[in-house]
Amino acid sequence: MTASLVFRLHDRGPELVREVLLERGWEEYDEEEREEEDWNLYWRGSAFRNSEYHNLLPWQRLNHHPKTVGITRKDCLARNLRRMRATCGSSLYDFSPTAFILPNDYTRFLAEYNKLRLTRGPSVYWICKPVDLSRGRGIFIFTDIKHLVYDCSVIVQRYISNPLLISGYKFDLRIYVCVKSFHPLTVYIHQEGLVRFATEKYNLSSLQNLYAHLTNTSINKFGPFYKTEKERVGQGCKWTMSKFRHFLHSQDINELLLWQRINNIVTLTLLTIAPSVPSCPNCVELFGFDILIDFRFKPWLLEVNYSPALTLDCQADITVKKGLIGDLIDLMNYSSIDSFRERAYQKHKHKRPCFHGNQPSPVLTKFKETKFQKETSGTQPSQSQALPLLKTLRQPKKMNQRRSRQQAPVADKRRHLPPVDLSRIYATRGRIINTTATKTHTDETLNLILGPHSRTNVSVVNRQTCPLSGETDVSSKTPDIRQKGLGFRRSAVSWRLPDIHSGSRRTVKAPLEGTTALNGQHIPPLRVGDFIRTFPFNKATLNASQNELDVKSVTQELHRLTGRLAAAQSDKTNRRTVEEELKMDTEGEEDFDSLFWGPKDPPLLSQCFKPT
Ligand code: ADP
């Protein structure tokens, strides 16, 4: 008998996650009926406590990595991007509007304000946003500093006053990004996303009209024109990304470069925190990146959402978010994770890891006497040592909570291990994560990555369908597939342990089921449902992220990729050079291709480099 997977929701939400998991046959955790550790996925909108990371068992997953606030709080994001701009060059990190954190940066803001006022007059716009609020709360736009009034920490940012409009309406893109792992960095972007519209026509002479300037659904759904049929936009305030792709096709732009620049924004933003996020392989995180496109088709990062809204307000929400959560669950690859929980119980001749009523768990009772504490020295445990420390988990809940609060520092030194055969699992170990990024690129070349570009012919868009894309879908049951020609093979079943021991940052790494191997390195599947792997995207970035994250190499690769893409799509006089370069560049890379996130039927990256 197969045990059901169990999910646990904090504060009974979000409903969509419950619905999707129940449809897939999962059971909801009930603290009255289950052991405290008898769950596979714990989902919460807010942050987990340190002790919750430290006490994770091998079959348990959390929906947040620790310490990602560095990009999800507006002031932290502004600070981190500023730091990266100073280290890697302002051209590379030129994708977020200049921002000042007030009150601290008031003097610097004043200097910039005065400078721009002198050179450009009153036509410079600013937006003021409370740092720890969301959903458009507390936001206002101003041109004159006398209107800047605040009573909490805020960021004041250059307002992108020339956004791309659709029939006069402002919009932004909500891009769903899943960071499967920070060590090594493994990123997926979902093909579907949302386009969020303002519900009144954009007009710079009415800055107070939030229905014209803000694209938050939480604001616009209360606007007087929400239900009105609006020219081209339609009713409501949302489109799916697929509908936006249709719109793009009607525009005179280089669509691939737009997608690639958004892709670059995601990677470069994650690079700002990746080296400092503790390794916790049993975590996964779904971020919502908000991207505004200006009238020159330059994408700008507005913010990164920690817990993107999963409410279903309209048909676009239903279409996008249900698929998104389903694909996220597939990406977590529970078929392998649960096998540990399953095997643990089977080994001890018990049918289910779920024990109803107040009966003590036979399996857990069995482990009660066994105490295993493992220092983070990195020595490989024997199988007998590998029995988990579950005794503490069997204590009454209140005592347990008290213990985790009081003993958090002790927990640093302890790791719980599963009752499964470990001998073949401790294959590789990570090293101390560190990074130094240096200034290497010229402004001119880096412009290719993110810089504004003028309109070019639509014909440059490679709309060719990827012949492998249909075959490369990875379902929940078979997360990995054999791919002829790409050298992928199914890996052995294995798992990862949580490791958030600050200081040493040693990672116990082993390939997850569903990854593929290339010269001993493991490549995550290139696609899971509509999630497209965007990092690593080639051999060099795979290498750059294996041990110490080499930020410099990654930025060079992003630059090279974007440059090749731009060259391949430029006019035919460049064709020879491009073909020669392509030959050089792809040598030895044919066994590691990636899909190009963004366009419909995402092509393989190598196909995008073929001159049009
Ligand atoms: P919140 O977390 O409150 O949603 P955001 O930073 O996402 O805050 O801003 C809310 C909305 O305001 C965005 O969706 C966008 O429409 C608009 N906005 C925010 N910053 C800018 C900016 N710098 N330029 C133009 N519009 C912006």
Image (cartoon, helix red, strand yellow):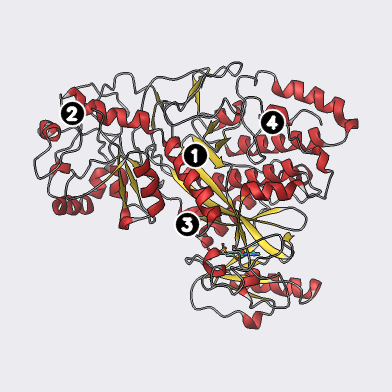
Q: CA distance from mark 2 to mark 3?
A: 38 Å
Q: Is mark 2 within 8 Å of ligand 1?
A: no
Which quarter of the rendered picture does the N terminus lie within?
A: top left
Find out whether the residues at labels 3 and 1 contact each other: C-beta distance under 8 Å: no
Q: CA distance from mark 2 to mark 1?
A: 45 Å
Residue 178 in percent (x, y) is at: 50, 43
* Amino acid under disc 4: Thr
Label 1 packing within 10 angstroms: few (<14), some (14-19), many (20+): some
Which residue does the numbered mark 2 point to in the structure image?
351
Mark sitting on residue 434: 1
Q: Camera-side residue: 6 or 441?
A: 6
Earlier-in-chain disc, 1 versus 4: 1
Which residue does the numbered mark 4 point to in the structure image?
465
Which secondary structure, mark 4?
loop
Which secondary structure, mark 1?
loop
Label 3 packing within 10 angstroms: few (<14), some (14-19), many (20+): some
* Amino acid under disc 1: Asn
